[in-house]
């Protein structure tokens, strides 16, 4: 992709999606931002890979018209920003260490984040065998690969769980 002063079709496709990076969280219509509140010099990989045509590109530079390196401000959102991409799914995992702990607050947070498939668990953090988590994160048996990578969210009442080491059982 070549960089120019004008906004290219590729940049428009990237900016049609919000950035899934938790450190960025930029809404659709705006360039990615750095941790220091500046316009990033290139779009985050997790964001531009939401565009199938750019899935194999190594980087997508922010065009000069977006003023990379300057203070970040939100730009107007495109009219279609509220429409989720086809084939996109958000997975989430809520966990608690004991059966007496409630998952309600975590479930509310995941729903607010737009998670479409939630896996539940109530199991000790000492458990080493977690077959349900492996089943949840394993790709489903399909004839075609998924259209785009799926961001995941995980919350925990104990604060010790991470998406990569939490057993989950499906909900919904």
Image (cartoon, rainbow, N blue to C red):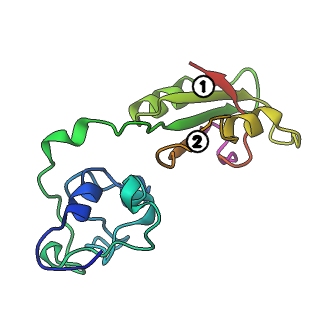
The quarter of the picture where the N terminus appears is bottom left
Q: Secondary structure at mark 1?
A: loop
Residue lying farthest to the front in this orientation: 143
Q: Which numbered marker is on residue 103?
A: 1
Tag on residue 155? none
Q: Position of residue 31 (x, y in %)?
A: 25, 64
CA neighbours of label 1 inside 10 A, class few (<14), some (14 to 19), many (20+): some
Q: Residue shown at 61%/35% (left/top)?
A: 93
Residue 167 is at least partly visible in this image = no
Q: Position of residue 164 (x, y in %)?
A: 70, 49
Count up the numbered dots.
Answer: 2
Q: Is residue 118 left or right of residue 14?
A: right
Q: Quadrant of residue 4?
A: bottom left
- Report crowding for label 2: few under 14, some 14 to 19, many 20 or more residues within 10 A (C-alpha): many
Relative vertical location of residue 78 with respect to residue 135 in this rendering, above or below: below
Q: Is residue 43 visible?
A: yes
Above or below, 91 against 39 in this view is above
Position of residue 10 measured from the top left corner of the image (x, y, whole percent): 26, 63
Q: Give the alpha-carbon distance from disc 2 to disc 1, as whole Å.
A: 12 Å
Residue closest to the eye, 25 or 108: 25
Q: Is residue 95 magenta?
A: no
Q: Quadrant of residue 156?
A: top right
In the rendered image, the quadrant that contains the C terminus is: top right
Q: Is residue 75 left or right of residue 139?
A: left
Towards the viewer: 23 or 101: 23
- Residue holding disc 2: 154
Q: Determine whether the residue tagged by mark 2 lies in a helix, strand or loop.
A: strand
Q: Which residues are magenta?
A: 154-162
């Amino acid at each position: 992709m070549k960089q120019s002063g004008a906004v290219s079709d590729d940049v428009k496709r990237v900016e049609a999606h919000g950035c899934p990076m938790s450190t960025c969280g930029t809404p659709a219509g705006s360039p990615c931002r750095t941790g220091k509140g500046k316009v990033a010099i290139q779009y985050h990989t997790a964001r531009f890979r939401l565009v199938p045509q750019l899935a194999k590109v190594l980087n997508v530079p922010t065009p000069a018209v977006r003023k990379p390196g300057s203070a970040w401000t939100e730009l107007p959102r495109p009219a279609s920003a509220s429409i989720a991409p086809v084939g996109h799914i958000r997975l989430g995992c809520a966990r608690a260490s004991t059966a007496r702990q409630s998952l309600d607050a975590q479930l509310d947070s995941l729903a607010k984040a737009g998670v479409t498939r939630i896996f539940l668990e109530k199991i000790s953090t000492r458990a080493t065998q977690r077959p349900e988590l492996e089943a949840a994160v394993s790709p489903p048996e399909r004839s075609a690969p998924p259209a785009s990578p799926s961001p995941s969210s995980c919350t925990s009442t104990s604060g010790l769980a991470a998406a990569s080491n939490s057993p989950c059982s499906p909900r919904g």
